[in-house]
Image (cartoon, rainbow, N blue to C red):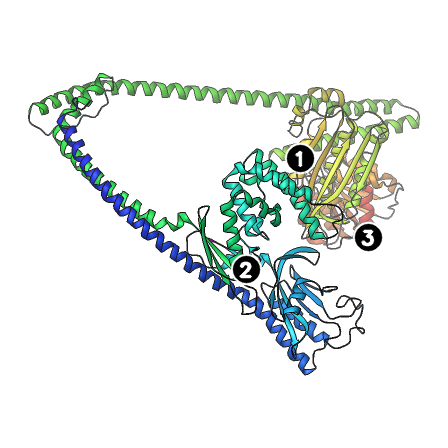
Amino acid sequence: MVQSMNLRMKLFLLITLIVTITFSVVGLVVSYRSMEMSREDALSLADQMAAKYSYEIKSELQAARVSSESLMTVFKTLIDRGEADRDTLNAILQNSLKQKKYIISFCVAFEPNKLDGKDAEYAGQYPFYDKSGRYAPYWSMQNGEISVEPLSDFDGDAWYAGARNSGKEYITDPFFYDVQGTPVLMTSLVFPILINDEFIGIVSSDMALESLQDMVSHVNTSGLNEYTEIYSNAGIIVAHPEDQYFNKNIYATSVYNMLISDPSKAGEALEIANNYVKNMSPQGMGDKTAANEYHNAVAFVENLAAYAVKSDAAKLDLALLPNILAKELLQLDAKRAAVAEEATSSIKKGKMFSVTEDGYYKIYMPIQFSEDTNPWSVAVNVPMSAVLKRSDEIRNYVIFVSAAGIALIAILLYFITRNITKPILDLAYSAKQVGEGRFNVNIPESKNRDEVGMLSTAFRTMVEQINSLISRLTSSSVELKKKNEDLKELNEALIEARDQAESSNRAKSIFLSNMSHEMRTPLNAIVGMTAIGQKAKEEERKNDAFHKIKEASAHLLSLINDVLDMSKMEANKLELSSAKFNFHKVIDDSLKLVDIQLRAKQHRLQIEIDKDIPEIFIGDDFRLSQVIVNLLSNAIKFTENRGKLGLRVFVRESVNNIYTLQFEVSDTGIGIRPEQAAKLFRMFEQADSSTSRNFGGTGLGLALSKRIVEIMGGEIRVESEADKGSTFFFTVKLERSADSGEHAGLNPAHAGSDTPERQADDGAQSAGVENQPDFSGKRILLAEDIEINREVVIAMLEATNIQIDCAVNGKEAYEMFAANPDNYDAILMDIQMPVLDGVEAAKLIRALDKDVPIIALTANVFKEDVEKYFEIGMSDHIGKPLDFDLTIKLLSKYLHRT
């Protein structure tokens, strides 16, 4: 292999090898020495940090200790002065608890009758005293709430007996206590109250271990990723970054680390744990702590069994391991057991102790609060990886410098040898690429004037000529491909447009066919019943024909209104009015409109209206009723006889007087398949083409309903299953009226719609005008250019005995009124008339008389038209075709006022 190398490569490799060996030897010596020095410096720093943390944590805990000591001093002073009444002591305790950050509770407990000799007087006065009356209140604070309860039967408890027996301050080991019903792991800092060297009671401040953990988290760190623990005098962990270490001793944490580092010991540990549980008797465990110890031991055995099967550190729960069992389990590792024993002893005696174990350098530093207290200890755990980090950085730096030096020398050698052979190598590489068919290779121009330069120039010229030919061919190919792609896109667009047009035409053709059928049906009834009425001789037969003509006319008017609404939807001009309306009346009127259909099919309708819905809203009551009637009509139509229907309305939410109401209309009808439901709310479409044949309809109702609901700030959807019925849901947003709760009376012609004559129609039919009024002595002016329309009005009002003067255009109407303005009690004004239309005529008349009622009588029923009539001063509006009851009702309204 070496023999096949050229001289440049051999020289390059030899020099590089010598430099690499030199740099490597120097780097190893420097790295080793720097590692030793860094390790010594880091361990010394860890010791300093432990001492510093010990001091900082002691300072934090000292604040809680000083609180107890201060209270003890205050109480002792008050007792000496004879001012220690119980209410004062309670007030001091309560105020102190509010001001202390890490203290969860205060306790003051006196020997019987040692405070004021009044225990019997206070006996049973809960919550401060138990039945003995002994002053021993326990003040606690949880989640900002302060409460007090009396302590009983505590003379034998460690926190009380320890201070009483020694006469010195005392810090307890961790213990659980129910604070306001919540078990809290805490420790108590207890001070005895001594009067003339006689023990009369204690003052204790309790700290939750979670607050000690908060202290640990606030200790300054040095950036070595160390963590801090606090141990009680018995070697119990009272603060640790991980919750599962709380209330565990050194033996428990050593067992946990042993099992994690050596999972093979799990089997032996399981056998010892099983024997331990067997020797514990769950019977007669009246002591809550013993019972918890037993249940935790059983749970740990189960947990350890699962860990033994699959050694996953996440499955091993240290919190379940009893401290007593841990000491037995640690027999499996004699070295760890010896370290744990020595560490526990050092903490007990208040001595410093350090050890390197499981990749950590750990130092225990005693915390001595005073000469009399039992010492605690703070442990700082520094990862050895962090201890050696500095030496690693130096080693890495040496390696980096060595590698950089080697690389720099190699680069220099490379460029020196490359400069000599580069022209020939470049030419050889280019020739290889051209031979492989890659004619777009870039051949640099040679600066040499020797034979190699001449060869390079000739080769470069040949390749350029080939590239020029290939470029022209490629350009032509790309242009042709682009034209083909443009043609393909154009064809796809044309096909898509054709399909959309055909789909739209099919839908509109079906719609026109349905609409033709729907319109011809009432027209056929009108034409047929007109002929029957003309030939009928019996009065009853004629009245029946006229009644059916009226019903067919109303149906035809409804179809025309739907078509008008559809055209407004397509032009995005469908708007809502805004007026006060009675919500419950809207529901009642809607139900009246479908009552005949309900009775005809013998359906049962269940109605549920939320009692929290206000009575008066502001909005478009007609459009709301239109949606309700559409959905109820569909439910009736698509449900077989004797079906069950439902109407449910409730408040979905209310914010700042804006109510979101949800309506649900359900039925037990034919239902809708999922693929049909997608087409329900489209214009001109029904769920199935057979729907129109079987049930009738134009396919506009649901599309109109959807648009109305959306304008009202809501949404509409359906849940259905074929042959099992459907439920339609829709929501609307309505503004609650300020006078909600009153029964608001609305003028039908003003009650909000861009087709108000339909609402007027419905309102008049609902209300009914049963008695024919007598307008004797009243005179009105009728402006109407169509003779048959004049005849209809005259015939309609003939029975009322009213006098009617007719004008055939607006100019004539104005002149007749101007000649005798006091003769007329009201004016019925058509809008579209020759010479002078109704709008201009109304303006002229209103200039003469501000009060005479002018009622628009026109087929212009759109909202913008009606609003314009009111703006110029017209009093009201009646849409054509005229409704007899509504016309009589409006004339009664205005003629009875004059």
x and y, in percent, of residue 739 in the image: 75, 55
Q: Nearer the viewer, mark 1 or mark 3?
A: 1
Q: Is residue 881 left or right of residue 402?
A: right
Mark 1 residue crowding within 10 angstroms, few (<14) / some (14–19) / many (20+): many
Q: Amino acid at mark 3?
A: Arg
Query: Do tag 2 and tag 1 residues touch (Cβ < 8 Å)?
Result: no
Q: Is residue 348 left or right of residue 23?
A: right
- Residue 168 position by quadrant: bottom right
Q: Amino acid at mark 1?
A: Lys
Judging from the image, what secondary structure is the residue with disc 1 in? helix
How far apart are the two marked residues, 1 and 3, measured between alpha carbons? 42 Å
Residue 706 circle label: 1
Stretch of the chain drawn in magenta:
223-228
Extreme-bottom residue of the structure? 81
Judging from the image, what secondary structure is the residue with disc 2 in? helix
> In this rendering, is residue 419 above or below 87?
above
| Magenta span includes 227 | yes
Q: Is residue 430 left or right of residue 619?
A: left
Q: Earlier in the sequence, mark 2 or mark 1?
A: 2
Q: Nearer the viewer, mark 3 or mark 2?
A: 2
The structure residue drawn at horizontal position 70% and vertical position 75%, both measured from the top left corner, is 88
Report whether residue 848 is seen: yes
x and y, in percent, of residue 24 in the image: 24, 40
Extreme-left residue of the structure? 450
Residue 878 circle label: none
Name the residue tied to disc 3.
897
Name the residue tied to disc 2.
348
| Magenta span includes 579 | no
